[in-house]
Amino acid sequence: MRFTVGLKLKGKADHLVVDAEDALIAALKIKTGRPEAQITYVRPANRRGDTRHPPHDTAGNT
């Protein structure tokens, strides 16, 4: 399942998409790669909304 994770890093908001079994694992994957980031939300990826505001994919995801 794909999740969109919102984060705040250096005063700027961003969001990324990751593959994970559940929301907690998705948040931990982002936190591992960016320990200084503040996680603001985690939600299932949304094709329609993500098309309007494309997120960044994490490296290594297909």
Image: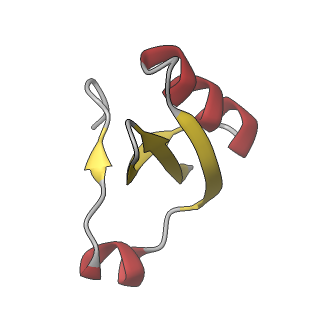
User: Residue 24's spot in the image, x, y percent?
Assistant: 74, 36
Q: How many numbered marks are there?
A: 0
Is 53 on the left or on the right of 37, as rendered?
Answer: left
The residue closer to the viewer here, 59 or 5, is 5
List the single residue furthest toward the front: 11
Is 45 on the left or on the right of 27, as rendered?
Answer: left
User: Residue 20's spot in the image, x, y percent?
Assistant: 58, 36
User: Residue 55's spot in the image, x, y percent?
Assistant: 30, 58
Which residue shows up at 51% across the image and 52% down it? 6
Q: What coloring was used for the rendering?
A: secondary structure
Could you say which quadrant of the image residue 34 lies in? Answer: top left
Which residue shows up at 52% across the image and 17% down it? 35
Is 45 on the left or on the right of 41, as rendered?
Answer: left
In the image, is residue 16 above or below residue 61?
Answer: below
The residue closer to the viewer here, 35 or 10, is 10
Residue 20: tell me if it is visible. Answer: no
In the image, is residue 58 above or below residue 41?
Answer: above
The quadrant the C terminus occupies is top left
Which residue shows up at 53% across the image and 15% down it? 32
User: Residue 38's spot in the image, x, y percent?
Assistant: 58, 36
Residue 31: tell me if it is visible. Answer: yes
Which residue shows up at 35% across the image and 72% down it? 50
In the image, is residue 16 above or below residue 51?
Answer: above
